[in-house]
Amino acid sequence: MFVIPVTRRSHLNPQLTRAVDRFFDETLDRVLGRPAGEAEARRAPALDITETDTAYLAVVDLPGVAKEDLKVSIEGKRVQIEASTRAAKEQKDGERVLYRERSEIAYARKFALPGDVDQAASSAKLEDGVLKLTLVKKTPAGAAQLTIN
């Protein structure tokens, strides 16, 4: 008997899939006694990408991330985003923690664009937990206008 591996692609709504995954992760957290949100501690942030004639525009949700804890790398047409949040663990004398849900979260997202990106001309802005990337399209090397005589 031969076993043929099959990869199934989900045609479900990605938001529905994330919601179901989150539900089961939270249920497992409770059953296994893990701190709430631990399963979500490693996640891919939500991402929207649009394109103009000159650039790709990416909007990434990174709640709780400070710009010091954010790294964006560009290599050719590949973009990598790494970020993390810091959990508040400070405790004053005489205080006891009764319940702690906030934990550190590490975000990681990689994606490829249709064309190469000009790293030097591109920019990033983090505001209110939303990262906005303007990834300027690279002009192909050797492309130039010819003067017609």
Image (cartoon, rainbow, N blue to C red):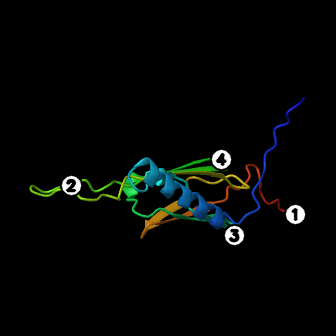
Is residue 88 in sight in this rendering? Answer: yes
Quadrant showing the C terminus: bottom right
Q: Residues within 10 Å of mark 3 (few under 14, many from 20)?
A: few
The three-letter amino acid code for the residue at tag 2 is: Glu
Res 18 quadrant in image: bottom right
Report how far apart the C-alphas of labels 2 and 4 lie in the structure. 42 Å
Q: Earlier in the sequence, mark 2 or mark 3?
A: 3
Whether label 2 touches label 4, CB < 8 Å = no
Q: Could you tell me residue 122's position as x and y percent?
A: 56, 59
What amino acid does circle 1 point to?
Ile
> In the drawing, does residue 25 fall left or right of residue 1?
left
* Residue hosting label 3: 52
Secondary structure at numbered mark 1 = loop
Q: Position of residue 75 (x, y in %)?
A: 61, 45
Labels 4, 1: front one: 4
Q: Which residue is mark 1?
A: 148
Amino acid type at image mark 3: Thr
Identify which amino acid the numbered label 4 is placed on.
Gly
Query: How many neighbours does mark 4 have within 10 angstroms: few (below 14), some (14-19), or many (20 or more)?
Result: few
x and y percentages locating residue 86 in the rendered image: 34, 54
In the figure, is residue 3 to the left or right of 38? right
Q: Which residue is mark 2?
A: 90
**Disc 4 marks which residue?**
76
Find the distance from the CA under tag 3 to the CA under tag 4.
18 Å
Residue placed most toward the observer, 110 or 52: 110
Distance between the alpha carbons at the discs numbered 1 and 3: 29 Å
Residue in view at x 67 percent, y 63 percent:
14
Which mark is first along the chain, 3 or 1? 3
Of 60 and 25, the residue lying toward us: 25
